[in-house]
Image (cartoon, rainbow, N blue to C red):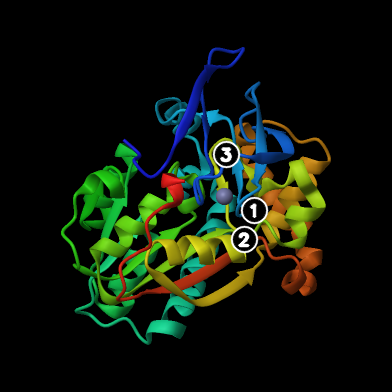
């Protein structure tokens, strides 16, 4: 199913979860040192998941991790990415709505800074599009109707029915899209969830026109919050986040998939600063009271607004498809 990725061993955890031990998803190296062990703080499930650092390329990744089949159980319907604004309490809805608008505008700005204004005839693909906020905004503001891919059936149905926008239910790897179709592939907070990120990047390059771009938003494991909060860092989000790309490893992954890095920008969000404090102070199973937790996180983070440039939580990367053939993966080592 994942030909790029080498699964070394399958085991069963004490609580019965099916786990797999994999070689480095980026370079294929099998030696790695344990950086930390973390629990699932959003749902409070009992397993501990080691985050290891590859001795070959320094990529940080979860290993062992749930098998692809076992991963589905870690994405229940109340996972925050699937929540609609209507599901929030009335008093929180204006803030949640504004947050989506602000994030969408920031993402579009980061993309257009490199590509120039999105044109109505451009072909766009958003992998893991969730509620499809970015493509919907682009359709309204720029006139281009992009295609979304979303594996959560209920979310995909909502996009199709309520927004009337085209969407493929499933994954990029299974979608079987035609080659050289798109001008831009977007992956917002998607790649860290992907069991085989290199394969997903290669597939995105295959569906891009020559000179097309990929825009990627990922957690930043090099930022001060990640280093300061360690196993309490909110963006660890194990075992949903499986791979943690820093500037060097994402550039290497992009190169191996046939891209050239064009733009790399770090940024912070106040709510995440607050959520980091909540988790450090012992908050547990926060998905049970996610609305309150995210609102509290936002309030706790507000005093840190002036310090945002020093507290990057995410990075936004834009890369260009290059003409040469991608290098073969190091799995042949
Ligand atoms: Zn590696």
Nearer the observer, 131 or 332: 332
> Circle 3 sits on which residue?
30
Q: On the image, which quarter does residue 327 sit in?
A: bottom left
Q: On the image, which quarter does residue 126 sit in?
A: bottom left
Q: Up-down: is 73 above or below 55?
A: above
Badge nearest the viewer, 2 or 3: 3
> Circle 1 sits on which residue?
58
Q: Is mark 1 within 8 Å of ligand 1?
A: yes
Residue 18 visible in the shown view: no
> Circle 2 sits on which residue?
246
Q: Up-down: is 194 above or below 226?
A: above
Residue 322 visible in the shown view: yes
Q: Up-down: is 302 above or below 331?
A: below
Label 2, label 3: how far apart the Cα atoms are? 20 Å
> For numbered disc 1, what is the local secondary structure?
loop
Mark 2 Cα-neighbour bin, 10 Å: few <14, some 14–19, many ≥20: many
């Amino acid at each position: 199913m994942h030909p790029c990725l080498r699964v070394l061993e399958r085991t069963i955890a004490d609580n019965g979860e099916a786990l797999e031990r994999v070689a480095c998803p980026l370079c294929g190296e099998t030696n790695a040192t344990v950086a930390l062990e973390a629990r699932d703080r959003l749902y409070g499930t009992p397993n501990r998941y080691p985050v290891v650092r590859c001795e070959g390329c320094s990529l940080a990744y979860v290993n062992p991790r749930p098998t692809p089949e076992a991963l589905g159980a870690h994405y229940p319907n109340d996972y925050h990415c699937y929540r609609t604004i209507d599901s929030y309490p009335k008093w929180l809805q204006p803030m949640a709505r504004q947050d989506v608008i602000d994030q969408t505008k920031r993402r579009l700005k980061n993309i257009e800074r490199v590509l120039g204004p999105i044109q109505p005839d451009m072909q766009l693909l958003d992998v893991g599009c969730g509620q499809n906020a970015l493509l919907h905004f682009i359709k309204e503001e720029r006139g281009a109707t992009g295609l979304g891919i979303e594996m959560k059936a209920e979310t995909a149905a909502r996009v199709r029915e309520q927004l009337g926008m085209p969407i493929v239910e499933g994954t990029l790897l299974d979608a079987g899209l035609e080659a050289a179709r798109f001008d831009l592939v977007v992956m917002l907070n998607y790649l860290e969830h992907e069991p085989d990120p290199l394969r997903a990047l290669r597939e995105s390059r295959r569906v891009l026109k020559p000179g097309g771009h990929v825009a990627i938003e990922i957690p930043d494991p090099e930022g001060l919050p990640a280093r300061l909060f360690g196993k309490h860092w909110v963006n660890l989000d194990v075992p949903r986040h499986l791979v943690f790309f820093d500037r060097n490893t994402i550039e290497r992954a992009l190169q191996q998939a046939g891209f050239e890095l064009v733009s790399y920008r770090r940024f912070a969000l106040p709510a995440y600063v607050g959520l980091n404090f909540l988790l450090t102070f012992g908050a547990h199973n926060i998905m049970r009271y996610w609305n309150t937790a995210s609102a509290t996180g936002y309030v706790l983070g507000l005093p840190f607004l002036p310090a945002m440039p020093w507290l990057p939580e995410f990075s936004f990367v834009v890369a260009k498809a290059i003409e040469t053939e991608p290098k073969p993966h190091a799995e042949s080592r």
